[in-house]
Image: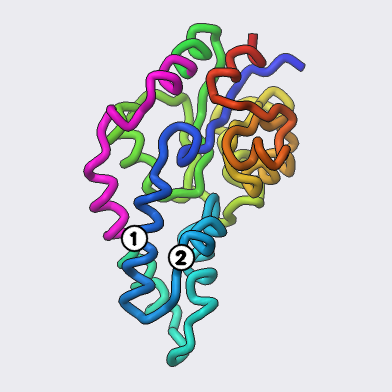
Amino acid sequence: MKFEAVIFDLDGVICFTDEYHYLAWKAMADNIGVYFDRTINNRLRGVSRMASLDIVLERYNGVPLSDAEKESLADQKNELYKKYLSKMSPKDLSDEVKNTLDLLRERGYALAIGSSSKNTPFILQQIGLGSYFDAVSDGNNITRSKPDPEVFVKASEMLCMPAEKCIVVEDAVSGAAAGHAGGMKVACVGDAAKAGAGDFNLKSISELADILK
């Protein structure tokens, strides 16, 4: 199969903000007296903000929350998260990731981001990739989070590329499922690779260059 485009998940693939997510959700949960730990946090990976909030609130035993109150909690978490993100810089982009991206670009691949995060543009700007990608599909233009394939389907449409010409790079099992549901092959790193969720399961992102020769 000759691929012509690569669609990357952001968090856990291009950069790592998991700890910032955890700290922000933990602070928000503590504020309303809800138990939250890293095991619960792992369930939020690749999941939209409001869907993540629903998971956090599974242990909530207070007065039922209105939609407006839930939106307020989600906003509270996001403001905390953005404070952490503001400390990010190009130093948070590893040489391995940047060299892999540059090599694929030199080989003529179209490159895109497919992320559920609404903070994607800000994160890319912080790490020095603000205008690097040919297309960015993220939480700002989708209505369904992974494992729904919408974010990757939209990325392929932005690139004017058929699904069979795209390969998705993911670190979450739900993200790998989303790529497959969108009719794309998937290369996995991190936890998804350890779970064998991809068509290609990599030990590091640099191995992507070997697949896409």
Horizontal placement of 117 versus 207: left or right? left
Crowd tier of the residue under label 1, counting other residues whose Cα lies within 10 Å: few below 14, some 14–19, many 20 or above: many
Q: Which amino acid does label 2 sit on?
A: Asp
Residue 30 lies within the magenta run: no
Q: Which residue in the rendered view is the most extreme toward the bottom? A: 63
Vertical relation: 87 (above or below) 211: below
Image disc number at residue 37: 2
Disc 2 to disc 1: CB gap under 8 Å: no
The tag earlier along the polypeptide, 2 or 1, is 1
Residue 86 lies within the magenta run: yes
Residue 107 pos. (x, y %) = 55, 7
Total marks in image: 2
Horizontal placement of 88 versus 56: left or right? left
Please name the residue shown 56% across and 27% down the image: 159
Crowd tier of the residue under label 2, counting other residues whose Cα lies within 10 Å: few below 14, some 14–19, many 20 or above: few
Residue at mark 1: 24
Please name the residue shown 28% across and 59% down the image: 80
| Image quadrant where residue 33 sits | bottom left
Residue 128 pos. (x, y %) = 30, 27
Residue bounds of the magenta highlight: 78-100
